[in-house]
Image: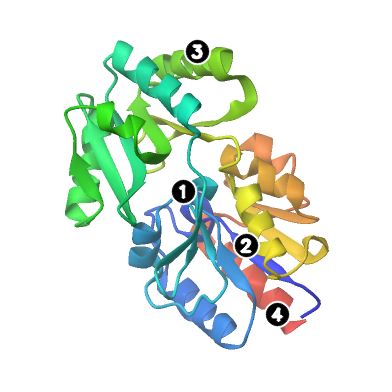
Amino acid sequence: MNGQLFITDLDGTLLNPEGKLSDYSYSALKDLLDDGMPISVASARSLHTMKQILGDLPIQIPVVCINGAYICDFAQHRYLAIQGFPSAIKAGLLNYMQERSLGLFVSAFIDEQELLYYHKLTNQGQLWYLNDRIKAKDHRLRETQDLSPFYEEQVVSMTLMDDRAPLEQVQSDLRQQFGDLLNLNLTENLYEPKSWWLTIHFHRANKAEGINYLLEQGFGNQKNLTVFGDELNDLKMFALSNQAIAVSNANPALIKKAHRVIGSNDDNSVVRYLQEIWKK
């Protein structure tokens, strides 16, 4: 297959506007994967939510989860690589959160399992996400009254949810304190308008680093890498690829970096493109 590798984002890209994989896309992807097309996923989602959405698709190439914090074997539900915060940076972040009594979600890898903690939730955006996780019966979910234990645990990401302005202030504060050591993604929640998310990772936890891991393991080569995305957290993987493809509903800043723009995510555009390429 000449080192080909196809990596797609999920929300806003492969998934429809309701955050689901359409029947058409599911069936077509299954056929392509069964036929040997080298397709995988790089998403801000966890392995748990990927499995809920993608079901039993025969994805053999490892997937990139939580924006690159985890590399996972999709079929075996195994964690192959983990990129968390170094101790000093984690301590600085936790100090910042506690000093300001901020409500947040903390993704951590403890006792060989991925867990999602929530702390001091108050606003509508936070409660929407908590209820969404409860409805989905997310086994990772835990409540915590105290952030202190995380100073000793492996933390891979932190997520704050609020109006845009206060999150922009937090983003500015953290950039001033940590410079380029953090990967900070500020985006509007696709499924709860006017609610914004600020996700915080160590700078090496990004989709491009995750894809580089796959390339180093022999899953394709950079020259023949094709990626699909829609948001700013896809910028680094767009820069890595010689064939970066944006859906038409993508952030304008990402579209400017794309080599090609296809249809929107409500028209199965990623899968239709994959079918077209595979026929050739």
Question: Pointer 2: residues within 10 angstroms few (<14), some, or many (20+)?
Answer: many
Rendered residue at 44%/58% (across/down) = 16
The local crowd at label 1, few if under 14, some if 14 to 19, many if 20 or more residues have their Cα within 10 Å, is: many
Q: Cα distance, mark 1 to mark 4?
A: 28 Å
Q: Amino acid at mark 4?
A: Trp
Question: Which label lies toward us, 1 or 4?
Answer: 1
Question: Which numbered disc, 3 or 2, marks the residue that appears first in the sequence?
Answer: 2
Residue position marked by numbered label 3 in the rendering: 173
Question: What secondary structure is marked by label 2?
Answer: strand
Single out the mark in the foreground, 4 or 3: 3
State if disc 2 and disc 3 touch (CB < 8 Å): no
Q: Is residue 230 above or below residue 242?
A: above
Q: Which badge, 2 or 1, comes first in the chain's sequence?
A: 2
Name the residue type under label 2: Ile
Residue designated by label 4: 278
Q: Nearer the viewer, mark 4 or mark 2?
A: 2
Q: Say whether disc 4 or disc 3 marks the residue closer to the N-terminus.
A: 3
Q: Is residue 19 left or right of residue 8?
A: left
Residue 267 visible in the displayed image: yes
Q: State how far apart marks 4 and 2 are (Cα).
A: 14 Å
Q: Residue at x 31, y 11 (%)?
A: 99
Residue kind at label 3, given as amino acid type: Asp
Residue 71, image x, y percentages: 52, 58
Determine which residue is flagged by label 2.
7
For residue 118, side relative to residue 234 (left or right) = left
Q: Which residue is mark 1?
A: 66
Q: Secondary structure at mark 4?
A: helix
Q: Decide if residue 24 is on the left or right side of residue 254.
A: left
Residue 133 position within the rendered picture, expressed as x and y whole percent measured from the top left: 24, 49
Q: Secondary structure at mark 3?
A: helix
Q: Reply above or below: 180 against 1.
A: above
Indicate the position of residue 235 as horizontal and vertical percent values.
66, 41
